[in-house]
RNA sequence: GGGCCCGUAGUCGAAUGGUUAAGACGUCCGCCUCACACGCGGGAGAUUCGCGGUUCGAUCCCGCGCGGGCCCACCA
């Protein structure tokens, strides 16, 4: 017997049982069923699942459960993206500064704790990965694979070491990541400085950083700026007398200042772009303590002092200064303005491989199809190679050696996983002992080989079976990173085969007000809070209703409330069917109304199958809701009550139909609402609904469907009449006169009498109308 | 500034080159009808953002404009 109400205790019961039974285990030995592999996104191990996770992992779970019912052997692993700056911050806050090895150990401990918290939350959502197949990017085994991939790419000359500007905090004397930057609005000063042109004419340059004058390596103007086009390719003199080239670049703003820009290597990010674009000489002017160098008289001065001194030195060449609102980047913790300073970093070549990445992306099925445009734009706009090194501690060590002479070498494969403190060492060709690199990898280096890692790379036999993955589900906002880097590394660089066949893009969950959820706005909705009021299956339905398109959607309490009432509806309908009992045999004579609902069931199955195949959960869910709630509950169940309460063969047919519709419906509902469907299925029909095959639609009974739709209209009119006359719906009517354009099947007239409690029905030919007395 | 997405009752959202433009939430009226009041039945509520164009006919296709969102870049 089903209990009175559906609640979370039922869901918890099944979650526990599934876990105990290993219900979602991948069957490694089964080579008969076709394989379906999912390259699940490894969430960053923050410890908390947010609504974005719930949305995207729900989609993944719908796919997995659907494919299992479709007869696939589904390989659904779960990874964890563990290494990152936020963890370092938290661990440092808790333990203070520690030696690297110890610090890393604490980060690992911390992360394990976060993983167990997140795993619990994922289980509460009813997600069904095979928990025996987990990977963590911080595991030595994972490190080894990342490092092997880098060694191979280094061997193919796709990875190299070069000078590169990094954001640097002079106060903390440390490189900092982009994520650690804050923007600060500030009113600075724009200085207008006289340079001299090739013929000695005055050229006015506007700059906020006069102290970088010694580092000026070029002057640029817009190619459409007729004031300057005659200067193209000539030499000009800076205010401090240095000779530099002047030429055109389309990104110069004609309207700003005088339309001339001085390029100093490392003045700001745009300077770096220009430096790369035109291979301008690199000129270092600021050291790691924020003091000037290679700047003549300014040497040794701090930036602010140097600015004063420089202005002094240029004297009357500074013709005016105007206030300027600017946004400067500061280190988030100490609020010190950051500098870009050059340092040795590791790069992966994405410029010469860009066209291959694009070509490979085109071989993948993108859902929705416009998703690929994010990747193409990115490839086409790439300014310079991917900087893969970070000066962090909790990260995968780069498996390389460097020599004082500037030479580099890869670690050998037999010393993987490679850790600098345990490195075997290497002799350089110059004779000196090389040092192990201590930098770590950008986290995208770790996550861009997930399809390889789940496929058992580099084991060729496993790769043959598991690579490429069938599906890569991910957020649309990380096409430029995760999808791009994965296609590049796993695909172009390491295997030559696209890493997945289909990529499914989901959008983000916004707050109900349409804004981004954020702590500062206080509009965050957490899955844990929702679980207090809503069963898991209603949260999953909300996800389904939010659509699979790469589209952001506000969180909707309306949807989730509706989903919750739908669960009650299913539950109560199931209790009704349970009370009615089962037919004595499946051989029974169906009437038109039975065939109508069976036909509707079958077309719903057909539609839902197509929608599930196309990842259109929104459509699948609404079709199910309309069919079950309105056709089955509001109409069919009401129509057959008189038969159920009576006796005879017509009762048998109704029982057969009620049970069949419910049973088949539970199957199509199962991927989205796995708990309620399991409970009802087990209780009424026995066995697990998740082990059933996805239903094949039977006959559509189109003729009967058409005829019964007329009946529906008539019933509705009679309900209206009762409603208008303030009668209860079960009130008896003496007589109803129907005016119909076509004859009504005699069998339906009798049904109508029972359904609407009408004693006499009179039919006349004419336009559709219903009059009751 | 570049790319992409979007604009439909109070709100969220389907659909369609052709009768009356789904559905949900909210609202209003009625009904405790033996699965469900967490429910049932019914009603009201839309110039389909604006302006042009293509067409016999546009909410849909095209152009422009206005408004919103996402990603990226920039602020010398």
Image (tube, rainbow, N blue to C red):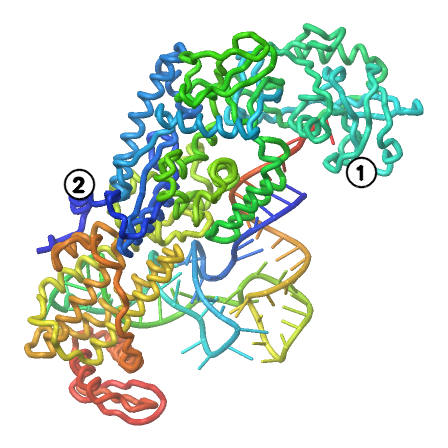
Q: Which residue is drawn at 41% across and 17% down?
A: A419
| Label 1 to label 2: alpha-carbon separation | 68 Å
Residue B33 coordinates in the image, percent (x, y): 14, 69
Circle 1 packing at 10 Å, graded few (<14), some (14-19), many (20+), is some
Q: Which residue is drawn at 29% across and 39% down?
A: A122
Q: Can residue A228 be seen in this view?
A: yes
Count of picture labels: 2
Q: Can residue A539 be seen in this view?
A: no
Helix, strand, or loop for circle 1? loop
Q: In which quarter of the image is residue A662?
A: bottom left
Q: Which of the pair A738/A473 is nearer the observer?
A: A473
Numbered badge on residue A223: 1
Report the residue marked by disc 2. Answer: A16
Residue A698 coordinates in the image, percent (x, y): 26, 71
Q: Is residue A55 left or right of residue A632?
A: right
Q: Residue at x 86, y 24 (%)?
A: A235
């Amino acid at each position: 017997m089903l209990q009175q109400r559906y609640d979370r205790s039922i869901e918890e019961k099944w979650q526990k049982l599934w876990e105990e039974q290993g219900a979602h285990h991948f069957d490694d030995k089964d080579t008969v069923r076709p394989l379906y592999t999912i390259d699940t996104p490894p969430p960053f191990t923050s410890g908390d699942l947010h609504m974005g996770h719930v949305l995207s992992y729900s989609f993944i779970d719908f796919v997995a459960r659907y494919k299992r019912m479709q007869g696939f052997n589904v390989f659904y692993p779960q990874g964890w993206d563990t290494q990152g700056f936020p963890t370092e911050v938290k661990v440092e806050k808790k333990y203070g500064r520690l030696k690297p090895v110890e610090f890393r150990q604490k980060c690992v401990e911390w992360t394990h704790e976060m993983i167990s918290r997140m795993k619990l939350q994922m289980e509460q959502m009813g997600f069904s990965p095979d928990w025996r197949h987990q990977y963590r990017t911080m595991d030595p085994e994972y490190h080894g694979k990342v490092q092997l991939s880098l060694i191979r790419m280094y061997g193919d000359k796709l990875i190299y070491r070069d000078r590169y500007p990094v954001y640097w905090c002079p106060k903390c004397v440390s490189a900092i990541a982009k994520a650690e930057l804050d923007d600060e609005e500030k009113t600075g000063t724009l200085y207008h400085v006289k340079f001299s042109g090739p013929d000695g004419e005055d050229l006015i340059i506007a700059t906020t950083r006069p102290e970088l004058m010694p580092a000026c390596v070029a002057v640029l103007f817009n190619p459409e700026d007729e004031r300057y086009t005659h200067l193209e390719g000539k030499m000009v003199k800076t205010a401090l007398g240095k000779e530099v080239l002047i030429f055109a670049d389309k990104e110069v703003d004609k309207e700003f200042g005088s339309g001339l820009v001085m390029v100093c290597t490392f003045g700001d990010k745009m300077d770096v772009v220009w430096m790369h674009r035109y291979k301008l000489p690199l000129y270092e002017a600021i050291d790691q303590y924020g003091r000037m160098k290679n700047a003549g008289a300014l040497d040794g001065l701090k930036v602010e002092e140097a600015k004063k001194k420089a202005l002094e030195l240029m004297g009357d060449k500074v013709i005016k200064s105007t206030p300027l609102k600017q946004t400067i980047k500061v280190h988030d913790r100490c609020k010190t303005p950051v500098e870009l300073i050059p340092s040795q970093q590791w790069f992966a070549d994405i410029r010469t491989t860009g066209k291959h990445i694009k070509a490979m992306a085109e071989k993948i099925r993108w859902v929705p199809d416009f998703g690929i445009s994010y990747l193409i734009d990115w490839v086409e706009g790439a300014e310079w190679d991917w900087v893969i090194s970070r000066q962090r501690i909790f990260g995968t060590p780069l498996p390389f050696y460097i020599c004082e002479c500037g030479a580099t070498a890869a670690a050998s494969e037999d010393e993987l996983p490679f850790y600098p403190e345990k490195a075997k060492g290497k002799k350089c060709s110059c004779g000196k002992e090389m040092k192990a690199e201590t930098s770590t990898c950008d986290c995208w280096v770790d996550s861009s080989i997930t399809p390889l890692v789940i496929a058992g790379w580099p084991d060729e036999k496993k790769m043959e079976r598991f690579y490429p993955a069938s599906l890569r589900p991910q957020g649309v906002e990380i096409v430029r990173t995760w999808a791009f880097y994965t296609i590049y590394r796993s695909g172009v660089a390491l295997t030559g085969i696209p890493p997945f066949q289909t990529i499914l893009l989901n959008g983000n969950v916004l707050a109900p007000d349409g804004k981004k959820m954020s702590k500062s706005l206080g509009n965050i909705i957490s899955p844990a809070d929702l679980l207090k009021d809503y069963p898991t299956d209603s949260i999953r339905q909300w996800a389904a209703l939010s659509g699979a398109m790469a589209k952001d959607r506000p969180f909707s309490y309306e949807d989730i409330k509706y989903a919750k009432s739908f669960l009650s509806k299913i539950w109560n309908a199931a209790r009704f069917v349970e009370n009615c009992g089962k037919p004595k045999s499946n051989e029974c004579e169906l009437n038109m109304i039975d065939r109508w609902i069976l036909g509707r069931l079958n077309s719903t199955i057909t539609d839902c199958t197509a929608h599930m195949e196309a990842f259109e959960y929104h459509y699948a869910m609404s079709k199910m809701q309309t069919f079950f709630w309105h056709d089955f509950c509001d109409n069919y169940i009401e129509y057959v009550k008189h038969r159920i309460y009576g006796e005879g063969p017509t009762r048998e047919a109704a029982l057969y139909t009620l049970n069949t519709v419910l049973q088949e419906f539970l199957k199509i509902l199962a991927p989205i609402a796995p708990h309620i469907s399991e409970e009802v299925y087990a209780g009424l029909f026995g066995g697990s609904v998740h082990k059933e095959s996805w239903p094949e639609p039977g006959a559509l009974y189109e003729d009967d469907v058409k005829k019964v739709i007329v009946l529906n209209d008539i019933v509705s009119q009679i309900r209206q009449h009762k409603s208008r006359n303030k009668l209860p719906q079960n009130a008896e009517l003496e007589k109803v006169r129907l005016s119909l354009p076509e004859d009504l099947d005699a069998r339906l007239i009798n049904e109508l009498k029972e359904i609407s409690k009408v004693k006499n029905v009179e039919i006349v030919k004419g336009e559709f109308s219903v009059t009751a007395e």
